[in-house]
Image (cartoon, rainbow, N blue to C red):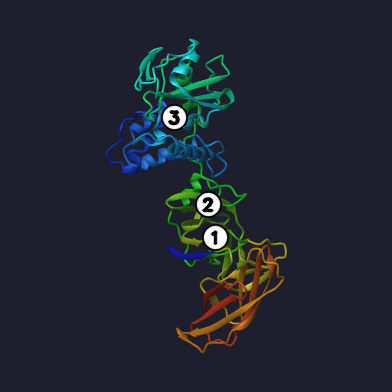
Amino acid sequence: MKIVLLCGAVCLLTVLPVGAEHGEEYRSWADGPEGFLLTEVERSAWSAIADDQAAEDFIELFWAKRDPDLSTRENEFRTQFNLRVAHADAEFAEEERRGALTDRGRTLILLGGPKEYARNEIGEYLARLYRTGQPPRPSSSDIDAHIQMQGVSFNLNKGRADLWGYSREQLPAGIEWPTKSDLISFAFFDHEGEGLFRTQLGIRKSADAAAVLDAAPAALVVHPDLESVPVFGLIPDVPPATPEELAWLDSGKTVLGVVADVAQGAAGPGVNLGWLSVRMPEDAPTAMTMVGRLSHGGEIVGSFRTAISGLAGSLGVVYEAAIPAPDGESVLDVALADAGGVLHVERFDLNFEGDAETFITPAFAGASVEQRPDASVGEPFIFGGYHLAVRPDGRYLKGENLSIFCLLVLPEAEEAVRTGTVRMRWYIDGKSTPAQPSQPAHFSPAGSSTWVWGTQLPLEALSTDRRYELKVTIKDSDSGASSTTKIPVVFTED
C-alpha cells in the first residue's frame, strides 16, 4: 500500500427490537425520529436484521429510496429531515422527551411546517369547532376548573391548544386528500397547561389528520423499487464503474515492474486534486480502461470508468488521471484493464489537509516535457501549457535532463508574475553536499489562480554508479507559501 500526504485546498412508532448483535448506534436507530418514516414493510424488514453491517446497508438504502435526485451525491430529503428534527428538538421538548419524538415533532417531520398556526384555549377551540357558542367560564377563584366538552376533559384556566392547518399542495405527492375542506387541521391539546401537547383524536376532523399522517411514510418513498444504493461518478462527466468493474479492484492482479504514484495536484483554490501516474513496462499488455473507487470514512465517495491511452516513453507506457477527493483521509483503489479484463491493481492512502487555499504543490520531476497549449489547469501534470512525464521512482537514462515543475495556488492575486526563492541541495549515497544559496524563483501565470515554476538540470555530470537525491524547497515571497520535495535520481541501462 502506498501512503501519500496531500496538503492543499479543494405519535411514536413502536418497532420490534433488532438482534442482540447490534451496536448501540443501530439498536436504537428506529426508536428515534427516523422511525416515523418507516413503512410497514420496512419496519418488518428492520426487525429481522441481526448485525451491524446489515443495519448499515438497510439505512443507506432507506435514505436513497427517499432521495428526490439520485444523480447527485446530496440527498435533499435527508438534509430537510435533519433540519426538521433540529427545529422540533429546539421548539417542542417536553420534560425529558426530546422535541423530535413528540406528537408535534412527528407531524413536522412528516409534513413540514403548517400553512396556518394558532394557539387557543381548548374550550374556545371546541366551541368554534362544534359551533356551540361560547364555552363555559369558571369563577375567578376556581383555579383548577375541569370540565368535559365533546368527550374532552381539560382545565378551563390552563388548557391550551396548538392548531396547525395544512393545504393540499403541502402534502407529499400520493396522499389522497381526505376532506372537502381547504385545510387539514391538526389539534394538539395541552390539557393541564403543563407543556405536554398531544394529538387530539376522537374530535371532529381529527380522522382526516390521522389519515394523512398514516399515509405519509409510504408517500415519502420516491424510489420504492430501488434495490441498491447508487455509486456516483467520482470525476465530472465520467461515468461510475459497473459492479463487475468494481470487482476488479479486489482481484489482487499485478504486473511486475509497474511504477505507480499519486501526489497533490492543483486546479485552483478550494479543490482537492490528486494526480495519478501508472507506468507499465514496455512488454506489458496495453491497457484500455482505468477503473477507480474512492472511499472516505469507510464509505464509498464515488467511482469512475474511463477509456485511457498511454504515453510511450523511454521506460514504459504511462497512464494518468486527475482524482478529486474530500478533505481528510481517503483510500483510492485503481485498476487498469485491457479487452480481456483486469491487468493491474493499485491502492493508495490519501490525506488532504484542506485548510489553506494558498499553497505550493510538491515539485514534480521527470525527463520528458511536451508542449500542450490547449491543456487546462487541473489536467494531470500540466504546468502552464507543458506536460511533464513524471518519474516517481527516480530512474533516468544517461544523457537525459532532470525537469522540475510545481504550481503555486493563490486566490485573488492579480500579479502577472510572482517572485520567490528556490533552494536546492544534493545528497549522494545518503550524504549531503554543501548547501547551495537560495536563488530567485519566478512564477508565471498558468491559469486561474495558479502560477508555475520550473527548471531543468543536466544529469550528464552525475556518475551512473551513485545514488542521488535532490532536496528542493520553493517559497513564494509575498504569501509565505512553501513546499519541500525530495527527488530521487538513479541511472538505469534499460
Q: Please state, as top left, top right, bottom left or bottom right, where the C terminus lies in the image.
A: bottom right
Q: Amino acid at mark 2?
A: Gly
Q: Nearer the viewer, mark 1 or mark 3?
A: 3
User: Which one is earlier in the sequence, the residue at label 1 or at label 3?
Assistant: 3
Counting from the top left corner in percent of width and height, residue 153 is at 36, 17
Disc 1 to disc 2: CB gap under 8 Å: yes
User: Which one is earlier in the sequence, the residue at label 2 or at label 3?
Assistant: 3
Circle 3 residues within 10 Å: few <14, some 14–19, many ≥20: many
Disc 1 to disc 3: CB gap under 8 Å: no
Counting from the top left corner in percent of width and height, residue 52 is at 34, 42
User: Which one is earlier in the sequence, the residue at label 1 or at label 2?
Assistant: 1
Q: Tally the marks.
A: 3
Circle 2 residues within 10 Å: few <14, some 14–19, many ≥20: few
Q: Quadrant of residue 446?
A: bottom right
Say which element carries label 3.
helix
Judge by depth and name the residue closer to the eye, 463 or 179: 179
Q: Amino acid at mark 1?
A: Pro
Q: Quadrant of residue 420?
A: bottom right
3D distance between C-alphas at marks 1 and 2: 10 Å
Quickly name the residue at label 1: 285
Q: Please state, as top left, top right, bottom left or bottom right, where the N terminus lies in the image.
A: bottom left
Quickly name the residue at label 2: 340
Counting from the top left corner in percent of width and height, residue 437 is at 57, 87
Quickly name the residue at label 3: 104
Q: Residue furthest left?
A: 20
State whether residue 494 appears in this view: no
Q: Residue furthest top?
A: 132
Residue at 58% of width from left, 88% of height from top? 461
